Image: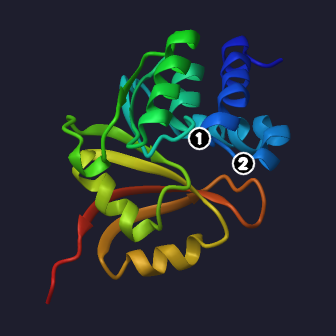
Amino acid sequence: MQDPKLRLFADLVAKWSPRINLISKSDLPHLWARHIEDSLRLLPFLPPNLDRAIDLGSGAGFPGLVLCIATGIKFELIESDARKAAFLLEAARQTGAPAKIHNCRIEAAKLDPARLITARALAPLDKLLGLAAPLLTEDGFCLFPKGRTAPDELTAATRLWHMSYERLASSDDESCILKLSEIRHASPL
């Protein structure tokens, strides 16, 4: 049985998407499986007693707003596109999700660090870590769904970053969720 608030969210994505390109037209018939269920795959990996998280480059709300709706955890959603930020604000209002929307570039966001950072389809891992690291608490971690390029992205990222990582919960052979912690920039020799 689908959660009524998530169903409402899916309906809002379908309604707004043709006007502001939240997801591609070809993805609309697969919205639930490709975007909502994919976002919900992060649920088992959320830390206990989490009261706040940050989602980078939130776009249509995947995974941050979906997780916020499903759990009631306060998510701070960072989105630089004003039209997408307006969608996120309206979707959070209509679903009653405890989300706060920041319409700015990630680098300009003035937020207290959080124990959890999420992002989906935003940037290659080496760049994503540079965006996430300043917003992550020392004991926190990132959950990043990645596709078939995950091994290559990890290799590229280790040239610039030191981190602990785990590959979690593949839904198929080509995708995984990367759990990254202890992130620090590699020092030059």
What residue is at 70 percent from the left and 16 percent from the top?
8
Direction from residue 169 to residue 74 in the image, left or right: left
Instruction: Determine crowd level at label 2: few under 14, some 14-19, many 20+ residues with C-alpha closer than 10 A.
Output: few
Is residue 172 placed above or below 106 in the rendered structure? Answer: below
Question: Where does residue 35 sit, x and y in percent of width and height?
Answer: 69, 41
Disc 1 target residue: 42
Q: Element under label 1? A: loop
Is residue 120 placed above or below 82 in the rendered structure? Answer: below
Question: Where does residue 144 sit, x and y in percent of width and height?
Answer: 51, 53
**Separation of residues labelled 2 and 1 (CA atoms):** 23 Å
What residue is at 69 percent from the left and 43 percent from the top?
38
Q: Earlier in the sequence, mark 2 or mark 1?
A: 2
Toward the viewer: 175 or 97? 97
Q: Is residue 120 visible?
A: yes
What residue is at 67 percent from the left and 44 percent from the top?
23
Disc 2 target residue: 24
Task: Single out the mark in the foreground, 2 or 1.
Answer: 2
The amino acid type of the residue labelled 2 equals: Ser
Q: Element under label 2? A: loop
The amino acid type of the residue labelled 1 equals: Leu
Direction from residue 45 to residue 40 in the image, left or right: right
Question: Where does residue 56 sit, x and y in percent of width and height?
Answer: 41, 45
Q: Quadrant of the N terminus?
A: top right
Q: Quadrant of the C terminus?
A: bottom left
